[in-house]
Image (cartoon, rainbow, N blue to C red):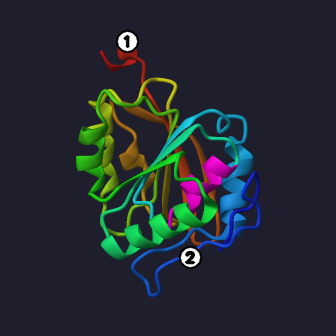
């Protein structure tokens, strides 16, 4: 696993051994960043369920102004910190070792994120709870792009609600990216 493009191009990244995290493959990461390349430079990037931190570090390498990485697993968080130190992105990254919902509440009134990326463990159905928390949060607005990485068989219609709508879906062999936006206040009434 490595950083694909930008200032830290080709730098290798560590991941924890075993199946506790599922690092996004370089090919899928490259496809994702090709789709969002215009939104990344100068953005505030939130990476929920960060795993190895490779998605947020890729964003910083490509010009994100700030990345907040959230990971509840302490082994994975230690790996993320090692990757942040190795890439020398310490001044651009803020690691939060806590669950996603707690992190969202902690970040209230500190940031408004341009991109929120979440790759929760598959088959635990954590997305609706996180989306509900985001819907009532000040850390996003109608311009924020929310990207969810999900298993290929995941029914993504559950991601749509009074608060969010799907703008795009990209399927791969084993997983998919679902792109969401917050509905305008008038759309919710």
Residue ID at (40%, 31%): 111
Label of residue 172 in the image: none
* Residue 68 can be seen, yes or no: yes
Q: Is residue 19 above or below residue 125?
A: below
Tell me what residue is drawn at x 58 percent, y 72 percent.
Answer: 174
Q: In x, y percent, where is residue 153?
A: 48, 66
Q: Which residues are magenta?
A: 52-61
Residue 133: x and y in percent read: 26, 40
Residue that numbered label 2 is attached to: 14
The reply to whether callout 2 and callout 1 are in contact (CB within 8 Å) is no
- Element at badge 1? helix
Please state which of the two labelled residues, at mark 2 or mark 1, is closer to the viewer. Answer: 2
User: Could you say where residue 27 lies in the image, as x and y percent from the top left?
Assistant: 72, 67
Specify whether residue 57 is painted magenta.
Answer: yes
100 or 11, nearer to the observer: 11
Magenta stretch, overall SS? helix
Check the picture and name the quadrant holding the C terminus.
Answer: top left
Q: Earlier in the sequence, mark 2 or mark 1?
A: 2
Rendered location of residue 134, percent (x, y)? 32, 37
Residue 32 is left or right of residue 159, and the answer is right
Quarter in which the N terminus is drawn: bottom right
Task: Tell me the number on the disc at residue 186.
Answer: 1
Reply yes or no: does residue 80 show up in magenta: no
- The residue depicted at 58 percent of the width and 68 percent of the height is 24
């Amino acid at each position: 696993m490595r950083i694909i493009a930008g200032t830290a191009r080709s730098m290798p990244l560590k991941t924890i051994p075993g199946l506790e995290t599922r690092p996004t493959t370089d090919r899928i990461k490259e496809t994702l960043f090709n789709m969002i390349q215009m939104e990344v430079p100068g953005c505030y990037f939130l990476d929920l369920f960060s795993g190895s931190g490779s998605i947020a570090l890729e964003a910083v390498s490509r010009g994100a102004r700030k990345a907040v990485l959230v990971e509840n697993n302490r082994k994975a968080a230690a790996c993320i910190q090692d990757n942040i130190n190795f890439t020398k992105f310490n001044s651009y990254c803020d690691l939060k070792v806590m669950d996603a919902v707690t992190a969202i509440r902690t970040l209230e009134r500190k940031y408004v994120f341009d991109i929120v990326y979440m790759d929760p463990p598959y088959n635990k159905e954590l997305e609706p709870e996180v989306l509900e928390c985001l819907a009532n949060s000040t850390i996003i607005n109608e311009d924020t792009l929310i990207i969810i990485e999900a298993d290929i068989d995941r029914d993504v219609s559950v991601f749509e609600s009074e608060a969010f709508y799907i703008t795009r879906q990209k399927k791969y062999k084993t997983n998919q990216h679902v792109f969401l936006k917050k509905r305008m206040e008038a759309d919710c009434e």
